[in-house]
Image (tube, rainbow, N blue to C red):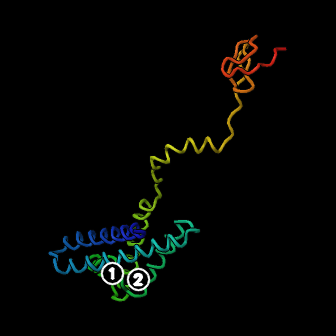
Amino acid sequence: MYGWRGIAAGILAGATLLAIGVVAEAARGPIDPASLAVDAVIVLTISAVLGLAFNVVDKLAFFAKYSTKAEAYAVAIIALAALTGRGQLLAGRQLYSLIASRASAPLIGDVAASLIAAAAWSGLLTLYYAPLARRRKKPQSPLKALLAPLEERAGRKAPPPPPPPPGYVVCPRCGALNEAGSKYCIKCGARLPAAH
């Protein structure tokens, strides 16, 4: 499956923010399990879809540097979340409400919480995606490993034969080594050239 890296990175980013929100909410009081389950399904689904979208952007914009693509995607997600006030879809209600409650005005708190949640999610996505997207060398098949030396030899010229050792004559027909002074080849019987 081609988008698994983006989906995995998105789910990891969403799960991290959910976990932070649950820990923060648990410190304040009891957590409603049904609400948490619904929240988890929404956050992880949205995170998976946005992670897949990032994977598609990464593949389509192959000519751009990874950091440029990640930054542009993060800015787009942050702007979208801030404009729509839907940061809780990325961070979960627990963390979102905790961030929004710190602001004095509700509208400012909503926009700020959306910005912070989207920025945290985008940062985590790019952090998790980078190691997943590293290309690994595919292992060479055993047949290719056996044929590689033969293909390499076929692609280059054979080195010239070494000169005969002193005192030997090479047969012009079969290439066998014969002792100096021999008139006929010991292998094929061809007449050897006379020594000068």
Between 170 and 72, the one nearer to me in the picture: 170
Q: Is there a contact, CB below 8 Å, between mark 2 and mark 1?
A: yes
Q: Residue at x 19, y 81 (%)?
A: 35
Residue 28 occupies quadrant: bottom left
Rendered-image quadrant of the C terminus: top right
Horizontal side of residue 135 vs 31, given as left or right: right
- Marking on residue 89: 1
Distance of label 2 from label 1 (alpha carbons):
9 Å
Q: Secondary structure at mark 2?
A: helix
Where in the figure is residue 165, as x and y percent of width and height? 70, 16
Check disc 1 and report its element: helix, strand or loop: helix
Q: First in sequence, mark 2 or 1: give its number.
A: 2
Characterize the local packing of mark 2: few (<14), some (14-19) or many (20 or more) Cα atoms within 10 angstroms: many
Q: Position of residue 91 (x, y in %)?
A: 32, 76
Describe residue 83's horizontal placement relative to residue 163 as left or right: left
In what quadrant of the picture does the N terminus appear?
A: bottom left
In the picture as drawn, the residue positioned furthest to the front comes out as 189
Q: Does residue 20 appear to the left or right of 153 in the view shown?
A: left
Total labels: the figure holds: 2
Residue tagged 2: 81
Amino acid on which disc 1 is placed: Leu
User: Does residue 196 sit above or below 30 in this rendering?
Assistant: above
The location of residue 158, given as percent across then percent down, is 67, 36
| Mark 1 residue crowding within 10 angstroms, few (<14) / some (14–19) / many (20+) | many
* Location of residue 44 in the rendering, given as x and y in whole percent from the top left corner: 30, 75
* In the image, residue 153 above or below residue 11: above
